[in-house]
Image: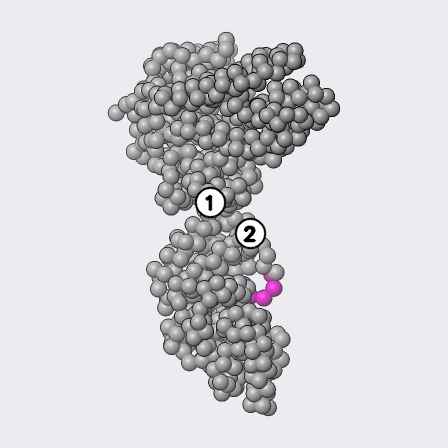
């Protein structure tokens, strides 16, 4: 099933076919997107078993809700949105100690974060690297992973208020650094 | 090796005599039942599918007697059946439907059952519609779903009632491929009123008419019966029991040729028409 | 669109979790937009892990969607295969249950209006569940019947499973209608044993005839016997202690007979089996 010739269809066409119950299209989408999702989620959770379970849940959700994709942006980003939220839910259910989470630094474009949009990745990477691990984790969860304050709080195992104050401190530090 | 043996089987529904002493023997490979509508093909196939018991006569399937409950269950565990009007729960998806039939076939282990369902879906090329509801499928696809469920559990005996009816030419070819593949190593009994399907697929044929087997043998043997009885002419011959104008303007006559007629090789259809004694004339093109 | 790609070394380190934070961040940003680099990650991921998760996903995706009653049955300990057979029973669909409830509601309402109709309610009550059993096996409503007839699944088992399911659903409807009746409370339950007896009798008859015919025969006999008694006002004759014991005996006798002959009898689920 996983060793077939490549499918010429684009991701968006695959999703449309999946809405029609096309299992071939689904297998192809899984082939394309499962590996990076596994790696990326793996960087945010130290338990491989939990990551496996979340990846499984994510693709089942993709199959069931392919029709709800809004046709805007990358299919990969949509899948990521489902995956990271499933991870947040899974972590909340298993209620891990906070130190089980890897402090994950990084950065990506985000529509709402104009500060970050305005700069080159290299500069921003360096700026982020200068942040303390706590602040970096908050920036990562909200900006890069696209989570809400509440979701980020669940992922990181800290109160939402703390997420907000850390985000404010991180913004101020980044502005200063990039100015 | 004979796997299906029907001897002197009769069956009446009310005052209608559907089968009137049929004899049939079949072994591994594809055996075709040919005959007009209402000839008793479906009744005979239902008998071979253990759905119907004969009023008189005997049926032996895979060496066992389907009239005995234990033997019947044993046979059913090795039987795949595609009925003429295979019904579907229309709200089911393809997978759900085949899975349901698999439950009826006593596959109780969920994991193994689902694997088997996926296998027959792959064999019949239905992967792309696995999750689709059956009511959204075309007639040809539904026929394929019907074949898929018949293949569950890799049966030794496959009973297919008009498997190619309602299919377009391309689908028909695809179906022939699947059926001939299925006929390797197992007994397939199929009915059709398409002589092309029978010619293409069957090692043996039985022509059923008015509840009896009028002919049993190979397609070549049936065709040999028409040798010297088909000729071409510029006009419809009065000696022909049937004749029609072909694309090139000449008449193809089937019957008892006059002296000096220009004989041409017969087809299975010619032989079939001769066997029917012209009773099928109303449905032949003229 | 993107002409720049992550170099193989960066991909390897990222995929193995060895990339430093800033490299990982830019890699992730790029991956969201680049199918080629996403594809390049695959070779660094354990193929067995990809395959085993796929097996799980495929199984969950294919697995039949289960209705709420079906999930409830499974939670109650019914096997998933059996639960499916129950869920597919034609009777257990909304329109049918509504029809049964409607007829009984009418009978209960009539009994409110005139005491004599109370007897008619008792005559009608067992017919609801019986009709449900008949419908569960009426050919027109089970499109896969022909395939089912050629399947090894035991006809008797299917008969009992579906009958039990139908009774479990229709009996509470009758009971609810019975509670709406005026007068003494025993009438609310007087139909129970007759229903059990009639059902068992019908089941036992399926060795000779199809379920639809069996139910029809039993129901006709019931109406012919009880209706005149009810109209004449001999309530006790039809539903009194003696009658109740009789029906209990019929139910037990029918059940016993099915148990004894279960391996030898041929159940006629269809026109002929």
Q: Is the N terminus of chain B in the top left, top right, bottom left or bottom right quadrant?
A: top left
- Mark 1, Cα crowd under 10 Å, few <14 / some 14-19 / many 20+, is few
Q: In this view, does A134 lie to the left or right of C48?
A: right
Q: Where is residue C160 in the image (x, y as percent from the top left)?
A: 45, 28
Q: Quadrant of residue B35?
A: top left
Chain ID, mark 2: A
**What residue does disc 2 label?**
A19
A148 or B151, which lies in front?
A148
Identify the residue at image location x=51%, y=35%. C88
Q: What element carries label 1?
A: helix
Q: Is residue A103 above or below residue B97?
A: below
**What residue does disc 1 label?**
C75
Q: What element carries label 2?
A: helix
Q: Is residue A178 left or right of residue B152?
A: right
- Secondary structure mostly seen in magenta is loop
Q: Can residue B36 be seen in this view?
A: no
Q: Does the magenta stretch include residue A73?
A: yes
Q: In this view, does B86 lie above or below C258?
A: below
Q: Position of residue B172 (x, y in %)?
A: 46, 35
Q: Quadrant of residue A41?
A: bottom left
B285 or C202, which lies in front?
C202
Furthest residue in direction top, as rendered: B15
Q: Where is residue C268 in the image (x, y as percent from the top left)?
A: 44, 21
Q: Quadrant of residue B45?
A: top left
Span shown in magenta: A71-75
Identify the residue at image location x=54%, y=44%. C68
Identify the residue at image location x=58%, y=59%. A69
Q: Is residue A103 magenta?
A: no
């Amino acid at each position: 099933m996983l060793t077939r010739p490549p499918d010429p269809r684009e991701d968006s066409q695959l999703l449309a076919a999946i809405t029609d119950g096309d299992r071939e299209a689904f297998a192809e989408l899984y082939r394309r997107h499962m590996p990076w999702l596994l790696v990326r989620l793996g960087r945010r959770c130290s338990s491989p078993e939990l990551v496996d379970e979340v990846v499984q849940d994510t693709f089942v959700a993709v199959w069931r809700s392919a029709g709800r994709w809004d046709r805007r942006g990358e299919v990969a980003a949509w899948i990521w949105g489902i995956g990271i939220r499933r991870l947040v839910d899974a972590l909340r259910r298993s209620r891990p100690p906070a130190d089980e989470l890897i402090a994950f630094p990084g950065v990506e474009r985000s529509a709402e974060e104009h500060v970050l949009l305005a700069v080159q990745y290299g500069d921003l990477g360096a700026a982020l690297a200068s942040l303390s691990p706590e602040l970096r984790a908050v920036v990562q969860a909200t900006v890069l992973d696209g989570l809400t304050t509440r979701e980020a709080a669940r992922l990181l195992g800290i109160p939402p208020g703390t997420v907000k104050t850390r985000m404010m401190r991180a913004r101020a530090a980044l502005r200063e650094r990039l100015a | 090796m004979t796997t299906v043996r029907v001897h002197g089987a009769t069956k009446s529904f009310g005052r209608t005599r559907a089968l009137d002493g049929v004899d049939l023997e079949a072994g591994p490979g594809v055996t075709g039942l040919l005959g007009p509508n209402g000839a008793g093909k479906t009744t005979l196939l239902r008998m071979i599918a253990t759905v119907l018991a004969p009023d008189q006569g005997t049926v032996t399937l895979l060496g066992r007697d389907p009239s005995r409950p234990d033997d019947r269950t044993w046979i059913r565990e090795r039987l795949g059946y595609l009925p003429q009007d295979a019904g579907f729960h229309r709200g089911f998806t393809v997978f759900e439907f085949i899975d349901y039939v698999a439950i009826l076939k006593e596959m109780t282990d969920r994991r193994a059952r689902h694997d088997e369902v996926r296998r027959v879906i792959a064999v019949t090329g239905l992967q792309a519609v696995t999750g689709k509801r059956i009511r959204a499928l075309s007639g040809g696809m539904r026929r394929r779903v019907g074949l898929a469920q018949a293949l569950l559990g890799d049966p030794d005996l496959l009973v297919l009632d008009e498997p190619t009816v309602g299919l377009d030419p391309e689908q028909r070819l695809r179906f022939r491929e699947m059926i001939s593949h299925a006929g390797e190593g197992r007994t397939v009994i199929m009915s059709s009123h398409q002589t092309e399907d029978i010619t293409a697929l069957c090692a043996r044929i039985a022509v059923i008419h008015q509840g009896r087997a009028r002919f049993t043998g190979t397609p070549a043997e049936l065709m040999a019966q028409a040798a010297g009885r088909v000729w071409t002419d510029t006009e419809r011959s009065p000696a022909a029991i049937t004749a029609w104008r072909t694309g090139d303007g000449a008449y193809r006559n089937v019957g008892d040729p006059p002296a000096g007629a220009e004989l041409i090789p017969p087809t299975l259809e010619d032989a079939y028409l001769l066997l029917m004694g012209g009773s099928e004339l109303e449905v032949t093109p003229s | 669109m993107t002409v720049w790609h992550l170099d193989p070394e960066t991909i390897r380190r990222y995929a193995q979790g060895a990339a430093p934070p800033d490299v990982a961040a830019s890699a992730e940003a790029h991956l969201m937009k680049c199918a080629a680099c996403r594809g390049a990650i695959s070779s660094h991921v354990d193929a067995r892990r990809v395959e085993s998760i796929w097996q799980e996903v495929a199984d969950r995706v294919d697995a039949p969607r289960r209705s709420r009653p079906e999930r409830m049955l499974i939670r109650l300990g019914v096997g998933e295969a059996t639960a499916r057979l129950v869920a597919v029973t034609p009777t257990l669909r909304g329109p049918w249950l509504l029809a049964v409830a409607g007829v009984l509601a009418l009978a209960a309402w009539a009994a409110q209006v005139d005491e004599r109709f109370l007897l008619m309610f008792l005559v009608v009550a067992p017919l609801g569940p019986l009709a449900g059993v008949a419908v569960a096996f009426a050919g027109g409503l089970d499109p896969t019947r022909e395939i089912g007839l050629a399947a090894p699944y035991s006809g008797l088992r299917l008969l009992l499973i579906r009958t039990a399911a139908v009774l479990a659903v229709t009996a509470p409807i009758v009971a609810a209608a019975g509670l709406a009746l005026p007068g003494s409370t025993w009438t609310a339950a007087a139909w129970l044993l007759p229903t059990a007896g009639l059902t068992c009798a019908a089941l036992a008859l399926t060795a000779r005839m199809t379920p639809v015919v069996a139910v029809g025969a039993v129901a006709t006999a019931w109406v012919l016997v009880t209706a005149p008694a009810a109209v004449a006002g001999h309530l006790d004759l039809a539903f009194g202690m003696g009658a109740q014991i009789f029906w209990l005996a019929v139910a037990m006798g029918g059940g016993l007979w099915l148990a004894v002959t279960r391996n030898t009898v041929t159940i006629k689920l269809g026109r002929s089996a």
